[in-house]
Image: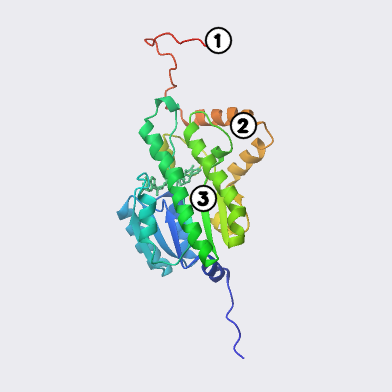
Amino acid sequence: MKSAAPIDARSVFRERYGPWAVITGASDGIGREFAAQTAARGLDVVLVARRRSVLEALAAELTARHGVHSRVLDVDLSDPAGADTIAAATADLDVGLLVAAAGFGTSGPLLDSDIRDELDMLQVNCAAVLTLTHHFGGRFARRGCGGLILLGSLVGYQGVGRAAHYAATKAWVQTLAEGLHGELRPLGVDVLAVAPGPVHSGFADRAGMVMSRAARPADVAAPALEALGRRRTIVPGALSKTLTWTLAPLPRRTRTAIMTRVMNAMTPNRTPHLVNPPDAPPTRTHPG
Ligand SMILES: NC(=O)c1ccc[n+]([C@@H]2O[C@H](COP(=O)([O-])OP(=O)(O)OC[C@H]3O[C@@H](n4cnc5c(N)ncnc54)[C@H](OP(=O)(O)O)[C@@H]3O)[C@@H](O)[C@H]2O)c1
């Protein structure tokens, strides 16, 4: 009698979450690392971001190294039609995994920001994530298995001054993922929230932040892929874990005060917002 072929972890992963994975934010940082590690596990990859030439170079590298198929989609997710473009461009593929890593942050006083940047961030970090989660979650539920990995952040566990809106977008992601975890599990769909602290990537430059101590993208992607199907949230990296355990028992307003101080230290080059600049009309006082 012929013995069954040994089932290794790679083939179990591919069976459950393959054959194709869609990774947004694959041109840099954490998303790029997810793409590399997903391909190393034998999944074919759809690489999504705006920089097409970077994605094409990565696709060629992953195919050469791991023998996987790839597809490159240059899509701007700040465009409300962006997520639908991804859905249409992957309709012919048997996708089993979505990693929603595209995202960016802003820092400094909200009132000093350009509201168009903030609305773009809301679109990329939240609305596009919702549309993609709804679309691929539905596809995975229909085929009875699949995985959704959503990138939150440590800042999403409380309000954070000087990153108030970015932190709010990440609280939104965390809440969405936590709720969906139980909702989709009976349908065979695993949902994981990943909440990193500082990570060396293109993120800090774009957000105007300085990170002295930070994890590597590999410290995020590897434990996240391990945790998919086992956990509902992971906080990757030693620094992030320490910060989370230290802050968790504290009242929310204390956590907000501490994280705002941390954010102040990470945005040393940003001038403080002048609530009452010298030539401004006098502030109205409110009774009570
Ligand atoms: N780095 C950190 O410290 C940190 C900590 C906690 C959470 N996170 C979260 O982790 C995720 C990945 O961040 P990262 O650190 O890897 O940052 P990153 O190195 O700057 O990468 C961000 C990725 O998102 C893509 N992207 C940005 N805007 C986009 C848009 N409008 N349309 C399509 N793609 C877009 C970028 O590609 P293109 O520029 O080519 O479009 C890039 O591939 C984000 O959601 C971030 O909020 C990061």
Foreground of the two, 188 or 269: 188
Quarter the N terminus occupies: bottom right
Q: Which mark is residue 150?
A: 3
Quadrant the C terminus occupies: top right
With respect to residue 166, does 145 lie above or below?
Answer: below
Q: Position of residue 163 (x, y in %)?
A: 48, 32
Q: Earlier in the sequence, mark 1 or mark 3?
A: 3
**Residue type pointed to by label 1:** Pro
The residue wearing badge 2 is 255
Label 1 neighbour load within 10 Å: few <14, some 14-19, many 20+: few
Mark 2, ligand 1, within 8 Å: the answer is: no
- At 55% from the left edge and 10% from the top edge, which residue is drawn? 287
Residue 166 seen in this snapshot = yes
State the residue at coordinates (41%, 66%).
93
The residue carrying pointer 2 sits among few (fewer than 14), some (14 to 19) or many (20 or more) residues within 10 Å by Cα, namely: many
Nearest the camera: 40 or 227?
Answer: 227
Residue at screen point 43% across, 35% down: 106
Residue 90 is drawn in which quadrant? bottom left
Q: Which residue matches tag 1?
A: 287
Residue 95 image position (x, y, % from top left): 45, 64
Query: Does dot 2 land on a helix, a strand or a loop?
Result: helix
Separation of marks 2 and 1 at Cα, in angstroms: 30 Å
On the image, the x and y values in percent for residue 267 come to 46, 30
From the image, state whether disc 1 or disc 3 is nearer to you: 1
User: Please, what is the three-letter code of the amino acid marked with disc 3?
Assistant: Leu
Q: Percent position (x, y) of residue 252?
A: 63, 31
Quarter of the image holding residue 3?
Answer: bottom right
